[in-house]
Image (cartoon, rainbow, N blue to C red):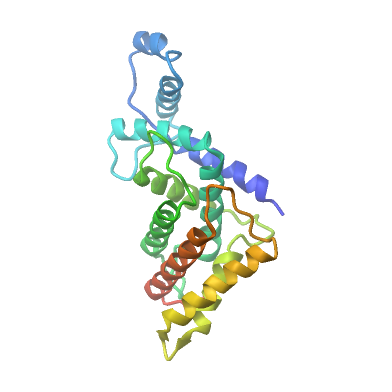
């Protein structure tokens, strides 16, 4: 299983995602060591000049510079980056940017990912670090997913949890209509079973009820993604 290798690739993707405005050489030399944030800004400025990365998501250079600082803050917050990297790898695997017929549909994947990241924050699975916004976490997750979309080297499917969640939705579906009361009950039972069996271990800051609510939100994101791509299952 190459999870650690996959995570390292995600770190590289995150670093490569950063960009910033070019700074005059004299000013740059004076400011690069004034603070960790300044060091990041200098790094990303050099990355732009070396053509390692470029602006995207419609951001201005100032916004992209702030995004670079935000990425550095996430990388210093273990729980945040582990959760984001984990869900990004799962989405890239189980919810690809294509329709059931193989045609491109990046919007469906991005919509699902944004919904999942929002739920992670709302339910306490990810604490947003200082100087970081929810939008920046969504951009980082999308950068990771975009990179992982083209990586074929995963030996253990990281999308397994998404597929198990989806199976509960499928089991509660009759004639194309989901009985969400039944699906939600099954999902809560699944989470509790994993916790009781010791397969789900939560840090003190995360409540089991938060994971239950997140799993239900996750099921709805999966359902919306399947509707957008014409997939019967993940």
Could you tell me residue 183's position as x and y percent?
Answer: 48, 78
Q: Which sits in the foreground, 192 or 110?
A: 192
**Quadrant assignment for the N terminus:** bottom right
Regarding residue 226, the answer to whether it shows in the image is: yes
Q: Which residue is at the far bottom?
A: 175
Q: Please indicate whether residue 66 sits to the left or right of residue 205 in the image.
A: left
> Eyeballing the image, is 54 above or below 191?
above
Q: Which sits in the foreground, 166 or 202?
A: 202
- Residue at 35% across, 46% down: 135
- Residue at 53% across, 77% down: 186
Could you tell me residue 158's position as x and y percent?
Answer: 61, 60
Could you tell me residue 146's position as x and y percent?
Answer: 47, 51
Dividing the picture into quarters, in which one does residue 20 lie? top left
Q: Which sits in the foreground, 192 or 79?
A: 192
Could you tell me residue 188's position as x and y percent?
Answer: 53, 71
Q: Please indicate whether residue 65 sits to the left or right of residue 167 in the image.
A: left
């Amino acid at each position: 299983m190459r999870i650690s290798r996959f995570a390292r690739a995600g770190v590289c993707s995150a670093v490569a995602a950063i960009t910033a405005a070019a700074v005059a050489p004299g000013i740059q030399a004076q400011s690069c060591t004034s603070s960790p944030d300044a060091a990041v800004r200098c790094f990303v400025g050099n990355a732009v000049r070396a053509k390692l990365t470029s602006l995207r998501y419609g951001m201005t250079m100032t916004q992209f510079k702030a995004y670079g600082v935000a990425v550095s803050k996430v990388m210093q917050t273990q729980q945040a980056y582990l959760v984001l990297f984990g869900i990004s790898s799962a989405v890239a695997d189980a919810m690809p940017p294509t329709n059931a017929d193989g045609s491109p549909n990046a919007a469906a994947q991005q919509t699902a990912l944004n919904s999942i990241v929002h739920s992670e924050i709302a339910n306490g699975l990810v604490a947003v670090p200082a100087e970081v916004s929810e939008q920046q976490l969504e951009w980082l997750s999308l950068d990771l997913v975009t990179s992982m979309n083209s990586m074929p080297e995963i030996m253990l499917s990281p999308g397994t949890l998404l597929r198990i969640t989806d199976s509960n939705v499928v089991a509660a579906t009759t004639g194309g209509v989901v009985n969400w009361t039944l699906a939600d009950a099954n999902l809560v039972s699944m989470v509790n079973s994993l916790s009781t069996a010791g397969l789900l271990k939560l840090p003190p800051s995360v409540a089991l009820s938060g994971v239950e609510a997140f799993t239900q939100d996750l099921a709805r994101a999966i359902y919306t993604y399947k509707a957008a791509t014409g997939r019967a299952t993940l």
